[in-house]
Image (tube, helix red, strand yellow):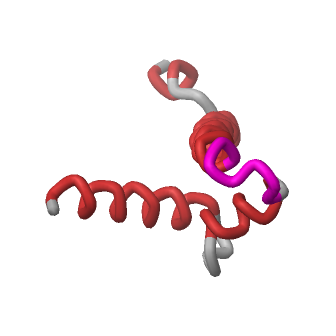
Amino acid sequence: MAKHLMPQLEDRIRAIWSDLERFLDERVAELKKQCPGVPEAVLRAELTGNFDCECRAVLSIKRKEAEAANV
């Protein structure tokens, strides 16, 4: 029975992906205020760097933010 209470893997992945997108969109919006002439796609590419995965990109951003807060 507990098997039916847990969302399917695909649903959980979609939910996490949605959270990642929202996080990146918020960061792009913040950067856009500082760099109004720069296209959002360029800002997003700068944020995600060379990562082929948004999960890795967000973890990298969060790690950098944590390091900056500890300085």
Is 65 rendered above or below residue 52? Answer: above
In the image, taking residue 43 as reference, residue 65 lies left or right, namely: left
In the image, taking residue 6 as reference, residue 26 lies left or right, namely: right
Q: Is residue 35 magenta?
A: yes
Query: Where in the figure is residue 33, as x and y percent of width and height?
Result: 65, 42
Query: Where in the figure is residue 4, as x and y percent of width and height?
Result: 57, 22
Q: Which residues are magenta?
A: 32-38
Residue furthest bottom as drawn: 50
Residue at x-position 61% and y-position 38% = 26
Residue at x-position 34% and y-position 56% = 65
Query: Which quarter of the picture shows residue 48?
Result: bottom right
Residue at x-position 81% and y-position 55% = 37
Query: Where in the figure is residue 49, as x and y percent of width and height?
Result: 62, 74
The front one of 20 and 37 is 37
Query: Where in the figure is residue 14, as x and y percent of width and height?
Result: 69, 39
Residue furthest left as drawn: 70
In the image, taking residue 39 as reference, residue 16 lies left or right, namely: left
Numbered-mark total: 0
The front one of 67 and 50 is 67
Residue at x-position 15% and y-position 62% = 71
Query: Which quarter of the picture shows residue 50?
Result: bottom right
